[in-house]
């Protein structure tokens, strides 16, 4: 079931419906971590973190799923992104997203990318 949910989650993200995907597929106690930064724990705290990130974006040029693999309780996806921040900084990134699933919801997600 989690593999199917992961594919749907990635489909929503690819379609620009990131917050819809977040509300549907993330557990209340989700832990999300950027590289080696301390994790942010809890759906409310992570919702605020996601919204703050999107508030910095002036223009999305690309958010493309490159590949994905999922089992019943783990999934990995590779993303290529290209966006411009409101301060004019142009960001191009490749990111790996590792998710841990439990009862059809993401309970842990960690993002790996170069800084």
Image (cartoon, rainbow, N blue to C red):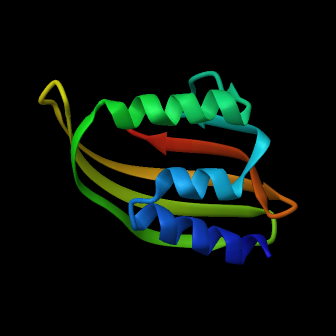
- Report whether residue 11 is seen: yes
Q: Look at 15% across and 30% down and name the residue there.
A: 89
Q: Look at 45% across and 59% down and name the residue there.
A: 17
* Nearest the eye: 68 or 17: 17
- Residue lying at the far right of the rendered structure: 103
* Nearest the eye: 30 or 35: 30
Q: Look at 31% across and 47% down and name the residue there.
A: 93
For residue 41, side relative to residue 23 (left or right): right
For residue 84, side relative to residue 1 (left or right): left
Q: Is residue 41 above or below residue 5?
A: above
Q: Quadrant of the C terminus?
A: top left
Residue 86 in picture, x, y percent from top left: 19, 29
User: Residue 74 falls in which quadrant of the image?
Assistant: bottom right
Q: Is residue 2 above or below residue 55?
A: below
- Report whether residue 115 is seen: no
For residue 103, side relative to residue 41 (left or right): right
Residue 69 in picture, x, y percent from top left: 61, 72
């Amino acid at each position: 079931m989690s593999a199917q949910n992961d594919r749907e989650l990635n489909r929503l993200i690819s379609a620009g419906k990131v917050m819809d995907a977040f509300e549907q597929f993330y557990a209340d106690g989700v832990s999300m971590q950027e590289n080696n930064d301390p994790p942010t724990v809890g759906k409310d705290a992570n919702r605020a973190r996601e919204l703050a990130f999107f508030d910095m974006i002036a223009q999305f040029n690309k958010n493309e799923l490159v590949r994905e693999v999922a089992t019943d309780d783990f999934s990995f996806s590779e993303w290529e992104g290209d966006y411009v921040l409101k301060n004019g900084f142009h960001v191009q990134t490749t990111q790996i997203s590792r998710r841990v699933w439990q009862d059809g919801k993401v309970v842990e997600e960690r993002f790996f990318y170069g800084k």
